[in-house]
Every structure is written in C-alpha cells, then in structure tokens.
C-alpha cells in the first residue's frame, strides 16, 4: 500500500472512532436527562422538519460533526420512552444489555438471513428463540422467526396459516395462487388488535372475509359466540385469531375453552400475544395463558414486555415445515443450509435483531424475566389503586395484567385531562374509547418504572384533576 492510501485508511478509522465516541456521549446525555425532562416532546413534527430540512447539502461533513449536529438539534422532538413515566400505547423501554448489544449488532453489520454467512448471529438468534419457547411454555420444536414487530409477526403467522389451511384442502397456494382457491375465513374477536385486519389485507383478505366474534365486558372472546361463528363456516376453512392481552384491559381470551372448539372445527388457531404471551413466564400470571400452548402459531414482541430496542418481534409456528413451505425461497444463488432465518420469515437481508433478545435474556436469567413480568403487573396494580383514590377518577378495568384504564365522569373532561397530562410533562398516558366513553390508559411496560415514578405520576394527575 502507498503511504497516501495508509494515511487515508487511518484517518477514516480515526473519523469512525471519533463518531462512535460522540454517539456514546450523546446517548449518555440523553439517558441522563430522562428522570427530569418532560416526557412528551416539546416540538412538533413540522418544527423538527424545519430544524433538519432544506435542500440536499452540497458538501459532506465529518462523521463526528454529523453526530454532534444531530445531537444538538434533535432533543426537543424526542419523547422520553426509555424513562420510567411513559405509559402510552404498549411500549417498553430498553434494558442496558439489550441496548449495548444492539450497538454491537450495528457495528458487526452481519446480514443475518442465512447461517452460512453469519454463524454467530444466527446461532444467537436460534438460542434466543429456544429460550423464549422454554420461558413461555411453547413447544420446543416450533420455529421462531425474528421480525420487526407484532404487526409483521401477525402477517407472517397468518400467511403460514392460510397456505397450510389451503394445502389441507388440497390447494397448492404457492403454485396456483389465490385466484379460484377454496374460501378461507378469518375468525376474529370483537376486540382484536387492528394489526390482524391489516395482516389480512396484506394477504388479500378484506373485511368481508372476516367473521367477528362477540366479546365480554373485558374484551374476552365468548366461547358460545365462537361456536356460533364456526357453525356458519365449512369445517377446515377457518383461521381463528385469539388474543393474549387486550390492549386496553389486558384481558386474555379463555384459551382452554376456545381452542378445543376451533380444533373440533378443523381450524388453524393463531394467538396474538404481542405483550400478553409473557404472562406465561410468571408462575403467578401463567393461569391467564392456560391452554394457549395448544395453538398453531403465536405472535409476540420483544420490544414491549422484554424491553429490547425497536424493532423486534417473533413469529412462532408450531410446525417449522409449515413456515418453510410458505417462506423458503427458490433463488438459485441462495444456498440452503438447513433451517435459516430466511426460511421461516418474509425477509432476506436483515440486521441481527434477535441478538439483543439473547442479551436481554442472558442479563435477566429466568428469575429476572419472572421478576420483570411480575413487577410490571404489580406496577399496574399500584397505579390502579392510586388512581382509584383520586376523587372523581374511576378505574374502568380489572387489572389482570399490565394495562390500566381510567376516566372522569365526563368524556370531555377526560379528554382534557389527557391533554393536560401531556402538557404538564410528568408522564405520558394515551387516550382511547371504551364502552362508549373516553378513557385514558396506562400501559405498565417499562423495566425502569419505579414506585417513585408511580407516585410522581399520581401526584401530577391528582393536581390536574383538582384544578
Ligand atoms: C402492539 C401490538 C401489536 C402490534 O405490534 P407492533 O410491534 O407495533 O407491530 C399487535 N397486537 C397487539 C395485541 C399489540 O399490543
């Protein structure tokens, strides 16, 4: 190598080291600000587009300067999700080991679709998958596809379910496509997550292809209503979508009653347990999941209850042959080496998103996972008890798991309280409609949330309600 070329390489390495140090400092500063910064962003989307936007810059700039510019300008538009008082939607924080290893995943830059090229990361994902099956009490031989989240997991599992359902009816979907295929009905609960409908759309199944089954007051599918819905469908033509963890109430479908009904009708059973599947890891909460292990496929997230960084969900299928039959690709430049990530999920090239799951599980151990899930539930119980003590506040749901729903007597007052909480800055709760009323919801999904966070949140809500 010429001296000039060596110099250029060294200066690039120096630039990279300086940029990584700057990113480390910026990350540490942001994380240190979490206990005291307002949780909701202080800038709007338009303001942030104004801060960063404009024409494509003509000249490039040094990587460290790029990081510094970003860190200096980004702050007002960041939301304190990794802190202890973000309770919106169903969103977890990030465990230290998972965060650090996520950085390593980017530095390693392993394209983890195939074990041939990236044995370390594929091995770690396989082990993480095996550990999850064991912790959640699911069949050890199931396939675990690491996907971006529960939405894509629901799509992945339902794609597998539809192909397998049609195959049992003598129709080869991969050869013949969907045109003229036997009818497949998606049987869904009244309180399913919207990602089930979207997953259906990705598969060419519209709302006319759905049979909606009535739920009880907590959002649990009613067995007699499922029986009624199945009676209108030819045996072997249904995919029944059940739910572990309703997003507002945290309620679980009664699997032990529902799954045998679906089975008797020759249906595939899918369980969306984006955050609820983790109840199975806790001896105390496991009864909520009783019978769910009898399903054919399961969706869960790691970026919710397990508290790894976005993007990370798992598509779990009882018989790996069903996943492979749907997803194994025929590209002749792709070498088959057995069960590879790209054989069981929709992507080819991708980051090793399952490695932070390995890190989270390695850092927690079984006892730590149990403790985490139990603590999230205890936090929900504490939040519900504290809210119920505030004059004028009604807690709307029983709290079987991690979700708490509350309201004031008047819908407009409830909505105003929601806006006031965001503005005041101590915490974030998000709004919804339940049973014809405006409600506010707290999802207790962050490993960081402490008794002090709950007390500060309750004090802020108490002040706002009184005012
Ligand atoms: C969050 C959630 C989803 C969607 O998950 P993403 O990770 O956002 O794709 C699906 N189902 C349920 C029950 C959820 O809570």
Image: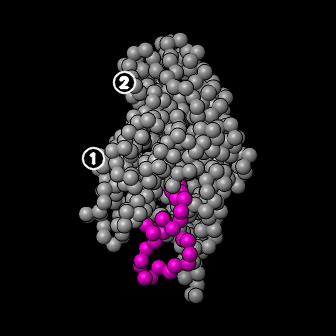
442 is within the stretch colored magenta: no
314 is within the stretch colored magenta: yes
Mark 2 CB within 8 Å of ligand 1: no
Q: Residues within 10 Å of mark 1 (few under 14, many from 20)?
A: few
51 vs 132, nearest the viewer: 132
Question: Which residue lies at the image location 53% right of the left edge and 65% below the top edge?
Answer: 320
Q: Which mark is residue 436?
A: 2
> At numbered mark 2, what does the secondary structure look like: helix, strand or loop?
loop
Residue 271 image position (x, y, % from top left)? 50, 48
Q: Is residue 406 above or below residue 160?
A: above
Q: Is residue 258 visible?
A: yes
Question: Which residue lies at the image location 53% right of the left edge and 29% below the top edge?
Answer: 404
Q: Which one is in front in this view, the residue at disc 2 or the one at disc 1?
A: 1
Q: Residues within 10 Å of mark 2 (few under 14, many from 20)?
A: few
347 vs 216, nearest the viewer: 216
Quarter assignment of residue 331: bottom left
Q: Is residue 174 above or below residue 49?
A: below
Residue 347 image position (x, y, % from top left)? 45, 65
Q: Is the N terminus in the top left, top right, bottom left or bottom right quadrant?
A: bottom right
Residue receiving disc 1? 208
The residues tagged by marks 2 and 1 sit, at their Cα atoms, a distance apart of 25 Å
> Residue reaching furthest left?
180
Question: Which residue lies at the image location 58% right of the left edge and 24% below the top edge?
Answer: 384
Quarter assignment of residue 228: top left
Q: Bounds of the magenta span?
A: 312-340
Q: Is residue 353 visible?
A: no
Residue 451 image position (x, y, % from top left)? 67, 29
Q: Is residue 88 above or below residue 272?
A: above
Q: Which mark is residue 129?
A: none
Residue 348 image position (x, y, % from top left)? 46, 69
């Amino acid at each position: 190598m010429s001296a000039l070329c060596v110099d250029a390489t060294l200066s690039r390495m120096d630039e990279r080291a300086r940029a990584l140090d700057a990113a480390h400092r910026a990350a540490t500063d942001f994380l240190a600000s979490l206990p005291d910064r307002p949780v909701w962003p202080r800038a709007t989307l338009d303001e942030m587009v104004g801060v960063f936007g404009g024409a494509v810059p003509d000249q490039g700039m040094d990587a460290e300067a790029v990081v510094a510019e970003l860190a200096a300008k980004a702050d007002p538009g960041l939301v304190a999700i990794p802190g202890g008082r973000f309770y919106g939607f169903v969103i977890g924080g990030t465990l230290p080991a998972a965060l650090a290893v996520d950085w390593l995943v980017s530095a390693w830059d392993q394209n983890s679709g195939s074990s041939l090229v990236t044995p370390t990361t594929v091995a770690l994902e396989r082990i993480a998958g095996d550990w999850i099956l064991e912790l959640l009490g699911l069949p050890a031989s199931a396939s675990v596809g690491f996907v971006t989240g529960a939405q894509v997991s629901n799509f992945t599992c339902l794609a597998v379910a539809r192909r397998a359902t049609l195959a049992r009816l003598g129709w080869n979907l991969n050869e013949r496509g969907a045109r003229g295929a036997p009818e497949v009905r998606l049987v869904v609960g009244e309180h399913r997550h919207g990602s089930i409908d979207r997953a259906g759309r990705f598969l060419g199944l519209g709302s006319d292809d759905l049979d909606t089954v009535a739920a009880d007051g907590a959002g649990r599918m009613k067995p007699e209503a499922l029986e009624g819905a199945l009676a209108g469908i030819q045996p072997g033509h249904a995919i029944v979508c059940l739910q572990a963890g309703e997003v507002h109430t945290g309620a679980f479908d009664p699997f032990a009653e529902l799954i045998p009904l679906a089975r008797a009708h020759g249906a595939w059973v899918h369980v969306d347990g984006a955050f609820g599947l983790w109840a199975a890891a806790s001896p105390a909460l496991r009864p909520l999941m009783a019978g769910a292990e009898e399903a054919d496929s399961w969706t869960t997230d790691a970026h919710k209850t397990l508290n790894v960084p976005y993007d990370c969900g798992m598509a779990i299928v009882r018989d790996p042959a069903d996943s492979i039959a749907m997803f194994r690709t025929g590209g002749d430049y792709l070498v088959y080496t057995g069960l590879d990530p790209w054989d069981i999920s929709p992507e080819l090239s991708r980051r090793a998103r399952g490695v932070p799951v390995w890190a989270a599980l390695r850092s927690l151990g079984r006892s730590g996972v149990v403790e985490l899930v139990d603590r999230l539930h205890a936090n929900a119980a504490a939040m519900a008890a504290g809210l119920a003590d505030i004059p004028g506040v009604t807690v709307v749901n029983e709290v079987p798991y991690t979700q708490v729903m509350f309201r004031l007597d008047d819908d407009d007052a409830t909505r105003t309280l929601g806006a006031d909480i965001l503005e005041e800055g101590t915490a974030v709760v998000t709004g919804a409609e339940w049973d014809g009323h405006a409600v506010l919801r707290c999802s207790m999904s962050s490993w960081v949330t402490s008794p002090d966070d709950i007390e500060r949140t309750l004090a802020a809500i108490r002040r706002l309600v009184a005012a």
